[in-house]
Amino acid sequence: MISNDINLAVQFLNQNGIIGFPTETVYGLAGNAFETDAIHKIFEVKKRPTFNPLIVHIKGTEDLEHVAQDIPSIAYELANKFWPGPLTLLLKKQPYIPELVTANQETVAVRVPNHPMALALLNQLDFPLVAPSANPFTRISPTKAEHVARYFENQIDMVLDGGQCSAGIESTIIGFENNKVIVYRLGALPIEEIEAITGKVILLNKKDKKPIAPGMLLKHYAPKTEFVLTRNVQEEVAWYNGKNIGLLLFNSCLPDLVIKHQKVLSTTGNLAEAASKLYNAMHELDEMNLDVIIAQRLPEFGLGVVLNDRLERAAKKEN
């Protein structure tokens, strides 16, 4: 059920239910962060392995100490600058945070979403929300209420409809080790903006079976249709001659190719616009019963680096 009734969402969450809810990044699958029954439901519905930790959503910086402890001053500087917004901080958890949330690790991922409906919801609750992206494990993240409803139908209590997500890709995840600032996941907040406050950060691209933070697994954000990422679209199309092809392109169609389904992310070459449209375009192509989706690699700077990270993970073959 899709609804914009916040009071109904509060009612379900107070009863240990789970809902889809909007943020500026992607839609989340939300439940009470302190109730293991609700958290178990999220893992079950998503078919998400329990070794993959969740992000806790709070209503403001004033609630940070309710979920984390021993918080470094630089974390407060970042929070004061970028919250509400697409920045997740990885911090030492309070002992009462359920281990299911943190995958038995000593750190908890925390953020304040920059969406009026999400903040209105959080302000009516007496607890924070855990909310991984509202999609089955490894599938395309949802940026519209309809995406969530299509994925889960009657498996969740409701989807709170807040319109299309403005940022369109997940938050940037930052942690702190030995007085160094570590980027665990590239996201909607550009690294350059973080470095303006922290100085040089360390990019971690850990490729193990037990991620420290969400979004680190190699296979992620993927459509059910075969998905290929390339620098040379024309050459890749030739490999799939005779197949029903969809194209995911950066700033212009390719009129020389006789391919009907061509999705352009930004005709002006604006990377922020491309980010906001990426997952929705992937959803649309994935619903067309194509043989293959061929995606064009984006420019390797700013948000282009982040979008290429998502496209690489979507194109990753299963082991």
Image (spheres, grey):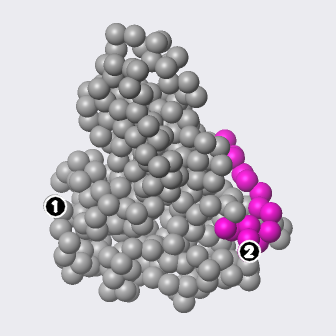
- Taking the image as drawn, is residue 215 in sight? no
Residue nearest the viewer, comparing 232 with 13: 232
Q: Which residues are magenta?
A: 193-207
- Taking the image as drawn, is residue 284 in sight? yes
198 to the left or right of 101: right
Query: Of the numbered discs in the image, which one, if any, rests on residue 1?
Result: 1
270 to the left or right of 143: right
Please say if 45 is above or below 315.
below
Judged from this view, the residue extending furthest toward the bottom is 62
Judged from this view, the residue extending furthest toward the right is 178
Where is residue 215 drawn, in percent x and y?
A: 54, 51
In the image, residue 109 lies in the stretch drawn in magenta? no
In the image, residue 199 lies in the stretch drawn in magenta? yes
Residue under the point 62% across and 61% down:
190
Spatial CA span between label 1 and label 2: 42 Å
Residue nearest the viewer, comparing 181 with 154: 181
Q: Point out the tag, 1 or 2, that comes first from the N-terminus.
A: 1
Please say if 117 is above or below 189.
below
Q: Looking at the figure, which quarter contains the C terminus?
A: top right
